[in-house]
Amino acid sequence: MVQKAARTAPSPAARRRGRPRAFEPETALTQAMDVFWKDGFAATSLDDLSAATGLNRPSLYGAFGDKRALYLQAYRQYRNRANEALAPLFQARAPLRAKLKRILVACLELYLSGEEGPRGCFTVLSASSDAVADPEIRALVAEAVDNTDRAFGRLFAEARAAGELPAGADPRALARMASATIHTLSIRARARIPKAELLPVIDDAVRTICGPKDR
């Protein structure tokens, strides 16, 4: 009588190889996004990404490509999520002063988020580091900045047409001022400047752009 060979249980190392059974690309991408957003491209290692996503290196490559490809996907996801969060605020029916303050406060809340502390804006982080040497990242950052300027420009053009801004107001110039405000909020948030000291920056920007309340 031939005896069947006993089955041996797979080792813990073997069980850890490959993708988890419940692998969800969108979740893993979000986890990678959080790491890149906090540390940037250069300071993030494949081991960091593996630890965050639960995927080993071969699985990361198989799901997303190399580290740079994963970074680009993570950054695009950040932009999509930021746009989804801010678009309703730009489209809301409200006086310009209230609408602008809500937009700037929402940006600040995003920049202050992070389990290990404020992360600032992923776009500003990329602009000051990885965009310098990488043309594709630089193009994505430039596109994001341009889109922000355009969104604010439309907001101020509509406000001027409604009489909330003087007839001589320049929507493009005001848009650049609003964009510069969110950029400085990002830098200051990442530098761990307290929220209580950042809210007055928003008030100053709203007052400068919209003018005195009694106008």
Image (tube, rainbow, N blue to C red):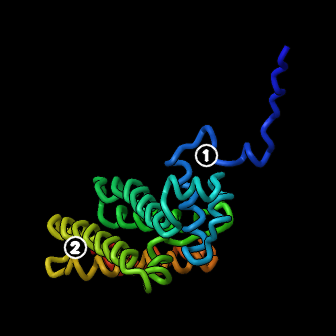
Residue 164 vs residue 31, the one in the foreground? 31
- Say which quarter of the image contains residue 77: bottom left
Q: Residue at x 51, y 48 (%)?
A: 25
Specify whether residue 178 is in view: no
Whether residue 189 sits left or right of residue 170 in the image: it is right
Residue annotated with mark 2: 165
Quarter of the image where the C terminus is located: bottom left
Q: Amino acid at mark 2?
A: Leu
- As drawn, which residue projects farthest toward the top? 1
Q: Residue at x 42, y 78 (%)?
A: 181
Q: Residue at x 31, y 59 (%)?
A: 90
Q: Secondary structure at mark 2?
A: loop
Q: x%, y% of residue 3?
A: 84, 19
Disc 2 to disc 1, C-alpha distance? 56 Å
Q: Amino acid at mark 1?
A: Arg
Whichever of callouts 2 and 1 sits on the residue coming sooner in the sequence is 1
Residue annotated with mark 1: 19
- Say which quarter of the image contains residue 138: bottom left
Whether residue 172 sits left or right of residue 80 in the image: it is left
Q: x%, y% of residue 6?
A: 84, 27
Q: x%, y% of residue 149?
A: 29, 74
